[in-house]
């Protein structure tokens, strides 16, 4: 994961408890992250709720495209502070970056489509900021964050600002095969029948044409993520159709945590950055 550090690959064991898998992945990254310099950043309130805050990472030079990162966490956990490395990664490569928090199930009373609504408020705030080029905005969502970005683009289509591209990482595109242990949280956010509210349903009903890159870890859970993402690509109703990149050696949690650990660009970051540049240039 770092130039002089051993490569750490942590497959996601379907039989391992969810939180233990999270802790194992994050622990492998935390010590290295602590030694890495962070890009200059500042915290801002983008909406009225105390949870509606974002960290804005900036670099030298005006007119940089913006990457908005939306963390995962199963709808009821996670925080932007865990992913400062993502902001630094993109600033180092010529972008402005923002990590956003959004309301969670339980503590903040989040209910669908509040995640998408929070992204909309964040983009309104960011679009008015002097350091942001509002014509070149990328959404980068992972897991539940990808679901919220999907909600923003495919459910709240009449409300969203122009988004140049969507990096959709390890999205649970439907919940028909979800772990029973997560049913209470899913019902709290999505309603009494979570199978009726999913990204595939939203995508099929939407005419959104935002270019999308599907990022899939090869050690993710097949029934809950990998297969549903394949089904999502199959029903995509508009052009351009999504492209797909396999994140080799990664599990559900590790891609975002592994960014900017000092290692060379790899077989998923290289095509991802190339895709983004092509989108910026109008090639997708």
Image (spheres, grey):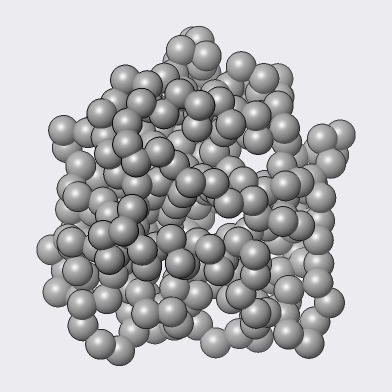
On the image, the x and y values in percent for residue 206 come to 29, 26
Residue plotted at (21% across, 83% down) = 62
Q: Quadrant of residue 247?
A: bottom right
How many marks the image carries: the answer is 0
Residue at screen point 71% across, 42% down: 220
Tell which residue pokes out farthest to the front in this image.
283
Regarding residue 175, the answer to whether it shows in the image is: yes
Quarter placement of the N terminus: bottom right
Is 169 rendered above or below residue 204?
below
77 versus 264 height, above or below: above
Vertical side of 190 occupied by 283: above or below: below
Instruction: Tell me where residue 218 appears, x and y as whole percent.
Output: 72, 47
Q: Is residue 42 visible?
A: no
Q: Which residue is located at x 58 percent, y 51 percent?
A: 245
Would residue 152 be found to the left or right of residue 198 on screen?
left
- For residue 182, side relative to residue 23 (left or right): left
Q: Residue at x 27, y 35 (%)?
A: 208
Work out whether residue 214 or residue 261 is closer to the camera in this orientation and state it.
214
Q: What x and y, as percent, mark residue 46?
A: 24, 56
| Residue 231 quadrant | top right
Question: In the image shown, does 223 or 130 lie closer to the viewer?
Answer: 223
Expressed as whole percent of the image width and height from the top left, the position of residue 108 reads 41, 38
Which quadrant of the view contains residue 255? bottom right
């Amino acid at each position: 994961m770092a130039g002089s550090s051993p490569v750490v690959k942590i497959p996601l064991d379907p039989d391992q408890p969810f939180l233990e898998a999270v802790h194992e992945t994050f622990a492998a990254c935390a010590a290295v992250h602590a030694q890495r310099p962070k890009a200059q950043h500042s915290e801002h309130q983008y909406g009225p709720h105390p949870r509606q805050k974002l960290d804005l990472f900036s670099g030298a030079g005006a007119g940089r495209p913006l990457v908005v990162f939306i963390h995962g966490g199963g709808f009821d956990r996670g925080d932007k502070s865990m992913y400062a490395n993502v902001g630094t990664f993109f600033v180092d490569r010529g972008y402005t970056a923002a990590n956003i928090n959004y309301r969670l199930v339980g503590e903040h009373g989040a209910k669908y489509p509040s995640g998408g609504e929070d992204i909309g408020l964040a983009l309104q705030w960011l679009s008015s900021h002097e350091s942001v080029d509002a014509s070149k905005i990328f959404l980068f969502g992972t897991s539940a964050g990808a679901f919220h970005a999907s909600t923003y683009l495919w459910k709240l289509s009449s409300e969203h600002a122009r988004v140049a591209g969507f990096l959709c990482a390890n999205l649970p595109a439907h919940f028909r095969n979800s772990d029973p242990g997560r049913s209470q949280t899913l019902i709290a956010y999505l309603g009494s029948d979570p199978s009726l509210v999913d990204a595939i349903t939203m995508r099929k009903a939407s005419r959104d044409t935002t270019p999308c890159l599907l990022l899939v870890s090869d050690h993710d859970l097949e029934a809950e993520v990998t297969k549903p993402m394949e089904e999502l690509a199959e029903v995509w109703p508009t052009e351009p159709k999504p492209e797909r990149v396999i994140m080799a050696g990664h599990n559900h949690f590790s891609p975002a945590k592994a960014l900017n650990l000092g290692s060379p660009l790899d077989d998923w970051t290289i095509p991802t950055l190339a895709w983004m540049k092509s989108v910026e240039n109008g090639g997708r």
